[in-house]
Amino acid sequence: MPAVSAESVRPKRILVYGDSNTFGWIYDPKVGVTRLPVEKTWVRVMADKLGAGYEVEVNALGGRTICRDQRTGIGTGSRIPGPLFNGMTSLPAVLSENLPLDLVIVMLGTNDAKAAFKTTADQLADDLGRMTELIRGDGWGGNTPYPSPKVLLIAPIYQPDDTAYGEFFKGADA
């Protein structure tokens, strides 16, 4: 009987890299911004549906962009410096700390569409293309034997001008 390596029987590993929509922040006009119970976030629902043959890791930060530095941290009294919201900045470390990976799901772009950034849909697509190249490229995995993961991009959610965030996302729907 041939030997079976641990690698051939390991669960498929998925990393979900996103912003507040992935984290589970929701807005309720009665109480403000709160977090969904973790088991109700789309990532955990997906993980439950996938079952035992999959491991799903989540790295989600409210306010994260694809590649833009925030001028300041998000929220009153934020202790996170604005540049740390740039998804390209932390991505290599996040990829490395979650090896091995079979798939990286990226759900970013909503915050890049804020009025302050004046980002076009073409720019968002180009930015996500560069992020995909980074994920698929070599270098961040060090000297590991693991191949580059596949990438699944989830488009930013529709953000109408009349959301609870007021002028924050004005023009994002375009």
Image (cartoon, grey):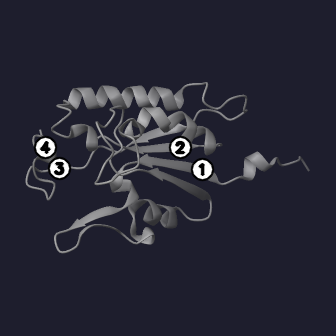
Residue 103, numbered circle: 2
Residue named by callout 1: 13
Q: 79 or 69, which is in the foreground?
A: 79
Residue named by callout 4: 173
Q: Earlier in the sequence, mark 4 or mark 2?
A: 2
Image coords of residue 131 (percent x, y): 42, 30
What element does badge 2 sit on? strand
Residue type of the residue flagged with mark 4: Asp
Distance (Cα) linking label 4 and label 3 = 6 Å
Q: Earlier in the sequence, mark 1 or mark 3?
A: 1
Residue type of the residue flagged with mark 2: Leu
Disc number lying in front (4 or 2)? 4
What element does badge 4 sit on? loop
Image coords of residue 113 (percent x, y): 21, 39
What element does badge 1 sit on? strand
Q: In the image as oriented, which residue stretches furthest toward the front? A: 77
Image coords of residue 108 (percent x, y): 34, 42
Relative height, residue 155 to residue 58 (above, below): above
Question: For mark 2, does the 10 Å Cα neighbourhood hold few (<14), some (14 to 19), or many (20 or more) residues?
Answer: some
Q: 135 or 83, which is in the foreground?
A: 83
Marks 3/2 in contact by CB < 8 Å: the verdict is no
Distance (Cα) linking label 2 and label 1 = 7 Å
Q: In the image as oriented, which residue stretches furthest toward the right? A: 1
Marks 4/3 in contact by CB < 8 Å: the verdict is yes
